[in-house]
Image (tube, grey):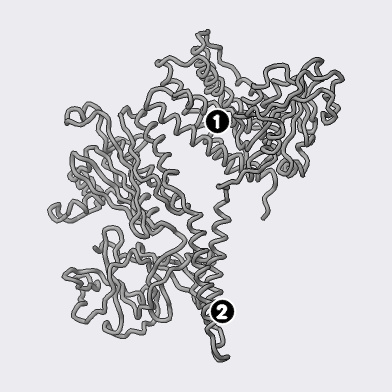
């Protein structure tokens, strides 16, 4: 369905403000560590808030515009006169609160397209802080002050009346290619310059017109204004405009015929020479302004990339069908074979390009954890620093989305359960400030993310005591390894915390974390050393869309299992198979016993292999468990595009356990992709 203009504008507004707020949060976190901000950082915060204010005002989100204006006022004062060291902590806290409010409102806009509006209490706090910075009496709490500028009426191109004796200027603006919403951005320029101009007119005159944005793209945005003050002030405003490619400010004669009648003045303007942003001659300015800079990056909706990848998968299938159905009885086929190889090479390259376009650095989710550590450490009065390693590691966009919640839960647990308070750490000879290390690196087709803390570590005795109380384990303690004991923290309803707090104690979180990671084909394990700390290790595939897998068959069903889960493939013998005391089939492999799963029993099909010797066994491993899968025949290794199972299948079967998706092969056949996590026998190691 085609997106309407309003929806497109809202989407761009949300995206751009999210990027700005991420930049702002990074600056604040760095500044809080240094307990101040540099002049460059202060200017950047001011610029971000100025842009958010203008965009919010244009979109008529007045509550957001008011808040941005209040933050902008605070940093305008700091930029002019600085701030005493004693007030920086309050400034940081207030701006962090503002960022949280903006993010909440943007989330509401994404869900419903509406925003709740006012942050009156926070705005009053900002006004109070501004008064203290100025050394004035703090103002009484009131309704939020209006934004510096209100949306202009685009249809009315002329502003105010011409002023006698005031010089004229022509301002030519070009926006970056592909920035979108050019007409709205032009209106933002008008709003920013309005307070400095005695009168104003612009071309195109109607910024609401359907072709206004295209006209600005083709010819630029031209603004004529009478300016009584210093024209350099115009340049300062323009330099703060987002997505501005280039601009020129030219002094022109008041009798120039190109000046719109609405602001024409009979007397001659005072300035005759051209001035540009870089004080270059007018001819040079025209050639610079009319040029279009090359853009190296554009924003693309990830849904378009998903569709593109699906089409590439269909092309792969179609190409294989053409090759398989080719008539080889017509004589020599050397040219056909050569063309086929070339086509396959190009399609593989296209697939790689599409996949690389979907890859994002994990820094996009790692940086969010910095704010979490900052806020939580303040709430529970613990000093904690976050160390980030391998932020440049790239993974698929869908994997990034699935990483955020698990990391949040693990880091919360590390701060609340693992890191000791300052007095305890000092008593144990540790630094007062705790440390959490978040690291990512790739290993083949997997990405490994580790979360380590230098806290007290997992308490084996406390974990086992709680497990026995809840009836989660029956084995004697002497038979339970440390790894088994530590893995109990992932059981539903498990928590060693006696008091329920805002962050933990309800036994909800780690079990969900492990389940969510398993659902995307990953695994989660934990290692700990008492008194030294705990490490959570997350292994997930680089992409959820393309899988390297082993193809095999059982009965009339073809299956694919991810290669990363396979440890070995063997031809079994009868002497290797036995039954335990509970009647479960087991297999002896390399001196160890593993549970044996027969896929023919799970999928209720008749196997072609009537005896153990006629079939094959895959030794697979997931999390801390290993087991064996018995099937008929192994067909080879393939790279396939994962497709979700159709929704209507849920109406045809009560269970889809053991199946995570499907893939269409080159010959048009459909293969089931197995979910190793749900195939794993309960309680079997």
What mark, if any, has residue 455 been given in the picture?
none
Q: Quadrant location of residue 672? A: bottom left
- Left or right of 104? Residue 182 is right
**Residue drawn where x is 20% and y is 31% of the image:** 430
Res. 636 visible in picture: yes
Q: Position of residue 36 (x, y in %)?
A: 41, 22
Mark 1 or mark 2: which comes first in sequence?
Answer: 1
Element at label 1 = helix
The image position of residue 338, as x and y in percent, is 52, 78
- Where residue 427 sits, quadrant-wise, is top left
Check whether the beta carbons of the residues at disc 1 and disc 2 lie within 8 A of each other. no
Categorize mark 2 by other alpha carbons within 10 Å: few (<14), some (14-19), many (20+): few
The residue sitting at 54% across, 88% down in the picture is 332
In the image shown, does 169 or 449 lie closer to the viewer? 169
Is 15 positioned to the left or the right of 537 in the image?
A: right
Residue tagged 1: 48
Query: What residue lies at 29% left-to-right and 64% top-to-bottom?
Result: 621
| Distance between mark 1 and mark 2 Cα atoms | 55 Å
Q: Quadrant of residue 679?
A: bottom left
Quadrant of the rendering where the N terminus is positioned:
bottom right
Residue at 63% across / 29% down in the picture?
278
179 left or right, relative to 547: right
Query: Where residue 187 appears, x then y in whole percent?
Result: 70, 33
Q: Which structural element holds mark 2?
A: helix
CA neighbours of label 1 inside 10 A, class few (<14), some (14 to 19), many (20+): many
Residue 101, placed above or below residue 84 = below
The residue wearing badge 2 is 322
Q: Position of residue 580 (x, y in %)?
A: 19, 71
- Foreground of the two, 460 or 621: 621
């Amino acid at each position: 369905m085609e997106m309407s203009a309003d929806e497109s504008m809202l989407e761009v507004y949300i995206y751009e403000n999210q990027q700005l707020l991420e930049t702002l949060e990074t600056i604040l976190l760095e500044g809080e560590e240094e307990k101040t901000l540099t002049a460059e950082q202060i200017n950047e915060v001011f610029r971000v808030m100025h842009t958010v204010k203008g965009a919010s005002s244009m979109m008529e989100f007045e509550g957001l515009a008011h808040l941005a204006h209040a933050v902008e006022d605070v940093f305008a004062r700091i930029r002019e006169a600085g701030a005493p060291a004693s007030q920086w902590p309050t400034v940081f806290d207030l701006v962090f609160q503002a960022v949280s409010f903006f993010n909440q409102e943007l989330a509401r806009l994404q869900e419903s397209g509406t925003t709740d509006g006012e942050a009156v209490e926070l705005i009053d706090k900002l006004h109070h802080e501004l008064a203290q910075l100025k050394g004035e009496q703090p103002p009484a709490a009131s309704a939020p002050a209006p934004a510096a500028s209100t949306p202009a009426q685009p249809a009315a191109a002329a502003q105010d009346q011409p002023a006698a004796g005031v010089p004229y200027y022509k301002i030519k603006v070009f926006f970056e290619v592909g920035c979108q919403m050019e007409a709205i951005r032009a209106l933002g320029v008008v709003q920013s310059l309005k307070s400095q101009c005695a009168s104003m007119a612009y071309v195109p005159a109607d910024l609401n017109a359907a072709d206004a944005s295209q006209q600005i793209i083709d010819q630029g945005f031209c603004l004529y204004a009478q300016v009584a003050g210093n024209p350099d002030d115009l340049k300062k405003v323009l330099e703060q405009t987002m997505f501005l490619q280039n601009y020129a400010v030219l002094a022109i004669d008041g009798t120039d015929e190109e000046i719109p009648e609405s602001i024409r003045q009979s007397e001659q303007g005072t300035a005759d020479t051209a001035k540009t942003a870089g004080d270059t001659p007018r001819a040079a300015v025209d050639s610079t302004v009319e040029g279009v800079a090359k853009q190296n990056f554009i924003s693309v909706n990830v849904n378009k990339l998903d569709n593109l990848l699906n089409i590439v998968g269909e092309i792969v299938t179609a190409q294989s069908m053409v090759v398989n159905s080719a008539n080889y009885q017509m004589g020599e086929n050397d040219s056909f074979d050569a063309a086929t190889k070339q086509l396959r090479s190009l399609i593989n390259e296209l697939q790689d390009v599409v996949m690389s376009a979907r890859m994002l650095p994990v820094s996009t989710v790692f940086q969010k954890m910095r704010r979490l550590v900052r806020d939580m450490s303040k709430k529970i009065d613990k000093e904690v620093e976050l160390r980030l390693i391998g932020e440049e590691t790239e993974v698929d966009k869908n994997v990034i989305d699935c990483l955020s919640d698990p990391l949040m839960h693990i880091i919360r647990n590390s701060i609340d359960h693992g890191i000791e308070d300052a007095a305890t750490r000092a008593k144990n000879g540790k630094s007062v400030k705790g440390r959490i290390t978040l690291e990512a690196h790739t290993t083949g087709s997997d990405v490994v993310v580790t979360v380590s803390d230098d806290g007290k570590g997992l308490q084996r005795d406390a974990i086992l005591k709680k497990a026995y109380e809840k009836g989660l384990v029956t084995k004697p303690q002497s038979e339970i390894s440390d790894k088994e004991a530590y893995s109990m923290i992932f059981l539903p309803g498990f928590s060693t915390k006696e008091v329920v707090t805002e962050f933990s104690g309800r036994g909800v979180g780690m079990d969900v974390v492990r389940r969510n990671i398993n659902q995307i084909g990953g695994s989660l394990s934990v290692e700990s050393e008492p008194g030294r700390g705990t490490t959570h290790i997350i292994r997930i595939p680089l992409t959820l869309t393309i899988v390297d897998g082993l193809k095999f068959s059982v009965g009339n069903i073809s299956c694919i299992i991810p290669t990363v889960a396979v440890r070995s493939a063997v031809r079994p013998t009868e002497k290797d198979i036995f039954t335990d005391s509970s009647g479960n089939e087991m297999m002896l492999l390399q001196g160890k016993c593993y549970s044996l799963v027969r896929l023919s029993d799970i999928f209720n099909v008749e196997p072609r292999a009537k005896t153990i010797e006629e079939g094959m066994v895959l030794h697979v491993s997931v999390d801390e468990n290993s087991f064996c899968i018995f099937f008929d025949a192994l067909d080879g290794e393939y790279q396939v595009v994962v497709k979700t199972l159709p929704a209507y299948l849920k109406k045809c079967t009560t269970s889809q356990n053991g199946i995570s998706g499907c893939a269409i092969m080159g010959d048009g056949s459909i293969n089931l992709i197995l979910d190793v996590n749900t195939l794993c026998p309960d309680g079997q190691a």
